[in-house]
Image (tube, rainbow, N blue to C red):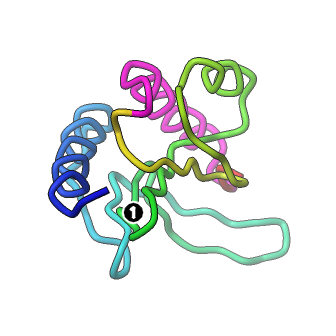
Amino acid sequence: MDNEQKKADSFRLIELMQKCSGFEPKMWGPTIIGFGSYHYKYASGHEGDAPLIGFSPRKAEFSLYVFSPTEDNKHLLDNLGKFRIGKACIYKKKLADINISVLKKLCKNTISYIKKHPEGAC
């Protein structure tokens, strides 16, 4: 993907996530653009702050931080399009490869889940 397409996709993701979350974009470190925030504390005692949803326009592909482990979200993945997934992150090369309406639902579901389960989205 060329830089112009990555830039255009990034601006589209900013607009989409801002509308879904109701929050302005904020940089989390040097590469993550996040929306909203929550404080988590794991059973191990590790704690910190993280964005409710966000993304990182990495060189090889986008990292989308929009997934929480609910049955509804797992079913949404069936119609998301072309992607791969890690523990709590969806990876995709370009925005054209995924279903935007499904991505919006994932964003909203994840925000709702995190607000109910601040111990972490993973």
- Left or right of 2? Residue 34 is right
The answer to which of 1 and 100 lies nearer the viewer is: 1
Is residue 88 on the magenta stretch?
Answer: no
How many labels, in total?
1
Judge the density around disc 1: few (<14), some (14-19), many (≥20) Cα neighbours within 10 Å: some
x then y, percent, for residue 65: 50, 52
Q: Looking at this view, name the residue that lies furthest to the front.
A: 2
Is residue 108 on the magenta stretch?
Answer: yes
Residue at the image point whose x is 33% and y is 81% from the top = 30
Residue at the image point whose x is 44% and y is 49% from the top = 53
The answer to which of 108 and 2 lies nearer the viewer is: 2
x then y, percent, for residue 66: 51, 43
x then y, percent, for residue 96: 34, 33
The answer to which of 82 and 107 lies nearer the viewer is: 82
Q: Is residue 98 above or below residue 118?
A: above
Magenta segment's dominant SS is helix
x then y, percent, for residue 40: 62, 62
- Specify the amino acid type for callout 1: Ser
**Residue beneath disc 1:** 56
* Magenta residues (range): 97-119
Indicate the secondary structure of the residue bearing disc 1.
strand
Residue at the image point whose x is 42% and y is 23% from the top = 99
Q: Looking at this view, name the residue that lies furthest to the bottom.
A: 30
Q: Is residue 9 above or below residue 82?
A: below
Q: Quadrant of residue 77?
A: top right
User: Quick one: quadrant of the N terminus?
Assistant: bottom left
Q: Is residue 59 above or below residue 37?
A: below
The answer to which of 69 and 115 lies nearer the viewer is: 69
Residue at the image point whose x is 65% and y is 74% from the top = 47
